[in-house]
Each structure stands twice: as structure tokens, then as C-alpha cells.
Image (spheres, rainbow, N blue to C red):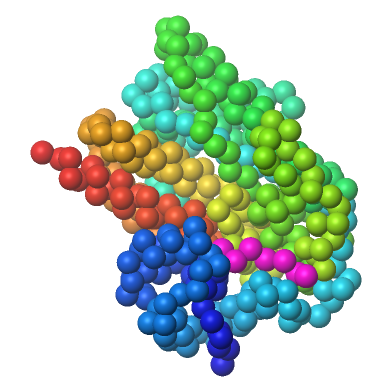
């Protein structure tokens, strides 16, 4: 059985990623305060206390054989050791990807006319009532504005890219984010002015989340695993000190990542024999094999649309609390609404495939959305007279 000589926050977070658990779930399993897990994220190099080391030893021993093997491989990658054959042959190379960007923004009750004008859509994994309007982005392969009855809009951009290296893709990703946010805010403003009798609303998205479908490439085995990890967490390939002029750290950085079989300690893998994927804090990457049994990218997109809408809604509620204001929600969208969405997102379905389940669990665990939903739900419940 694998053992850890000295647990630091980094190894502890690695164990959490293998378990695919939220901060609260992982803390509950260990019997510790959730703030300890948050501390590990801020100080990953700090050595855990002796009592905590024993708790982590016991938690690792209780893992399944599959979870222990995943922990062993990721720990070796973290320590710069090779446990997989063929890493020497894994090198940067060209590839083609389909990029999906999600840009959520809270607008509130003023969004009602847009919702009324949208085309009704089938409910996603979160069961949220949603309608869609055309995006009209001239450069994207496809673009759309998803309007939720709870007052959230999520702009979705689909872009097809062919690049010579993952570093090139990472630079494009971060440089395009600023332009995408400006465009999305302008497009939402146009739609609101058109359907809301000239209303002027500040509707610029706070952030962008990316999901990549890897298509044409030359990687196999460890090389493919490293490529998916870098697609999910591309920040290790670029210099982002100047957000308006993100630049490459140099080709040698990507070469080194492939040579060592790099993996982010908090990223969570998912998939099966017919697909591979990685979920992380800043994005998702996925490579489906040519097999009808494989999870489809459209299923990942459907989950992310609902997840980003709920993230934006819960963030709005928590920001109001932080600003010293009582959160007020429209009728029908209070704490019971969030409780229902939480249940639908986290509960397994009888018709759900194993691939879909592990994908859903991986995305929810790395996004920490369940924790935010519970916090927002508690805030609304506490404010109910």
C-alpha cells in the first residue's frame, strides 16, 4: 500500500482530488474544519500537524484500490518521478481543439424581458428554466446567450482553433478573455436595450471559464494525459503579470512539462476506456475516442451552462452579504430554489452512465459549486422572516 512520508497541504489536496469531494465533504470525511482545507490551498507547502498526518494516513488507507493507484501516479508526477512508460517520447506538438467559453453575469429581474423573448430550451442537469437568444459573434464558430429565469445570463462561445503548441493556445486563451468580456457585455447591453425599452444596464461578465474538446493530435498514453492537464490549467505556460499583454514563458517550459508528465495536484481526471478528461478550477479538457459509447462534449457543455449560472447566482448572494446587505430574491428563487438545484446536480440518476457520473462529480468537486450553493442557501434561509 502506498504511504506518504510527510503530508503537506499539497499532498492533502491531491488526496481530495482523487476522492472527487468538495471542501466540506472532504473536511467532513477527515473530521476537520473546512477552513483547514482552505488553508492548504493558500499554503500548499506547509507541513501538516502530526495529528492531521495520522488522519490523512488513515484516509488514504481507506481509499479504494483505484483511488490509491490514481494517488500514487499523481504523487509521482508531483514529485517529478516517472511511473508511466513512454514519458520520454511525450513532446509538445500541434493539435486542433474546439474551445467553449462560458461568460456568466447576474442581471436580476431586469432580465425578464429577455427571458420572455428567448427560445425555450430543455432543462439541463440543474433543472433550471432556460431560454436562448442569438449571440451574433462574427468570429466564433457559434455563439449564443442563455437566459435563466433566476436572473442570470450565460454567454457561450464556440471557437475552433488549430495551434502548433499548447503554449500558443494558452496565450490566445488569456488574450482573448479581455475582448470576449467586453464583447459579451456590449451584446447583453444591446439585447437589453432592444427588449427593455432602452434600458441601460452594466452587464459585463466577471470571469470566463473554458472547456476544450481535443480533436486532432499525435499524443498517446502519458503524452495525452499531460496535454489534457495543460489544457485544463494553462496558466503554468504563460506570464500573466500584465493581463493585457499575456506572453509565453518560452517553449522550454512546455517541453519540461511533457518530459516530467506534469499534473496539477487539484485537477481531477474523469472518463473511462473510451474517453479521457480533466477538470480543474479554471476549466475542463476532454478527448472522446471514436466510439458511440463515449461521453459527448454537448453533455459537458450542458452541465457547465447550469453550473456557471448557479455560480454567478450564488456569488451575487454572497457578495451582498459581504457588503452588509440583505439578499432579496424574486418570488420562487429563494433558498428552496437553490436547495432543489443542489440536489439535482449532486444526486445520481438511474439513467446516468458511469462516464457521465464521474464527469459531473469531477466538475462539481473542482469548481466548489456545492459549497457555494450551500452557503448561499444558508444566507437566504437566515434572512427569511
The picture quadrant where one finds residue 210 is top right
343 in relation to 191, above or below: below
Residue at coordinates 84% horizontally, 50% vertically from top-left?
A: 250
Q: Which region shows up in magenta?
A: 260-266
- Whether residue 164 is visible, yes or no, is yes
What is the quadrant of the C terminus in the image? top left
* Left or right of residue 196, residue 218 in this image: right
Identify which residue is drawn at 56% across, 63% down: 266
Q: Which residue is drawn at the image coordinates 58% and 43% (left, top)?
A: 209
Residue at the far left: name it: 385
Q: Is residue 109 left or right of residue 262?
A: left
Q: Quadrant of residue 112?
A: top left
- Is 186 rendered above or below residue 73? above
What percent of the width, then of the height, locates residue 234?
70, 51
**In the shown orientation, is residue 305 left or right of residue 29?**
right
Magenta stretch: helix, strand or loop mostly: loop
Q: Residue at x 54, y 37 (%)?
A: 207
The N terminus - image quarter: bottom right
Residue that protrudes farthest toward the top in the picture: 198
Camera sees residue 158: no
Q: Nearer the viewer, residue 106 or 1?
A: 1
Amino acid at each position: 500500500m502506498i504511504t506518504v512520508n510527510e503530508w503537506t497541504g499539497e499532498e492533502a489536496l491531491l488526496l481530495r482530488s482523487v476522492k472527487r469531494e468538495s471542501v466540506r465533504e472532504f473536511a467532513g470525511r477527515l473530521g476537520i474544519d473546512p477552513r483547514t482545507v482552505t488553508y492548504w490551498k493558500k499554503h500548499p507547502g506547509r507541513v501538516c500537524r502530526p495529528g492531521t498526518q495520522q488522519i490523512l494516513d488513515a484516509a488514504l488507507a481507506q481509499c479504494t484500490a483505484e483511488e490509491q493507484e490514481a494517488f500514487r501516479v499523481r504523487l509521482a508526477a508531483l514529485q517529478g518521478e516517472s511511473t508511466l512508460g513512454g514519458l520520454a517520447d511525450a513532446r509538445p506538438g500541434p493539435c486542433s481543439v474546439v474551445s467553449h467559453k462560458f461568460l456568466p453575469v447576474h442581471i436580476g429581474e431586469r432580465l425578464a424581458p429577455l427571458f420572455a423573448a428567448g427560445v425555450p430550451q430543455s432543462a439541463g442537469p440543474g433543472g433550471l428554466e432556460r431560454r436562448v437568444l442569438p449571440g451574433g459573434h462574427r468570429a466564433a464558430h457559434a455563439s449564443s446567450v442563455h437566459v435563466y429565469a433566476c436572473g442570470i445570463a450565460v454567454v457561450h462561445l464556440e471557437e475552433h482553433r488549430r495551434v502548433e503548441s499548447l503554449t500558443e493556445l494558452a496565450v490566445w486563451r488569456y488574450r482573448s478573455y479581455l475582448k470576449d468580456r467586453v464583447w459579451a457585455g456590449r451584446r447583453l447591453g444591446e439585447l437589453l436595450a432592444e427588449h427593455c425599452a432602452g434600458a441601460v444596464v452594466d452587464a459585463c461578465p466577471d470571469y470566463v471559464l473554458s472547456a476544450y474538446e481535443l480533436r486532432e493530435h499525435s499524443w498517446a498514453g502519458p503524452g495525452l494525459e499531460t496535454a489534457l492537464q495543460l489544457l485544463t490549467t494553462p496558466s503554468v505556460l504563460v506570464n500573466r503579470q500584465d493581463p493585457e499583454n499575456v506572453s509565453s514563458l518560452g517553449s522550454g517550459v512546455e517541453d519540461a512539462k511533457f518530459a516530467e508528465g506534469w499534473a496539477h495536484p487539484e485537477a481531477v481526471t474523469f472518463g473511462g476506456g473510451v474517453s479521457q478528461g480533466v477538470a480543474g478550477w479554471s476549466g475542463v479538457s476532454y478527448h472522446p475516442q471514436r466510439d458511440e459509447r463515449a461521453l459527448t462534449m454537448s453533455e459537458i457543455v450542458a452541465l457547465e451552462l447550469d453550473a456557471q449560472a448557479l455560480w454567478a447566482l450564488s456569488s451575487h448572494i454572497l457578495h451582498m452579504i459581504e457588503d452588509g446587505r440583505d439578499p432579496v430574491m424574486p418570488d420562487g428563487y429563494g433558498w428552496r430554489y437553490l436547495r432543489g438545484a443542489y440536489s439535482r446536480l449532486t444526486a445520481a440518476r438511474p439513467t446516468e452512465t458511469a462516464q457521465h457520473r464521474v464527469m459531473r462529480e469531477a466538475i462539481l468537486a473542482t469548481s466548489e459549486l456545492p459549497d457555494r450553493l450551500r452557503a448561499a442557501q444558508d444566507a437566504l434561509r437566515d434572512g427569511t422572516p
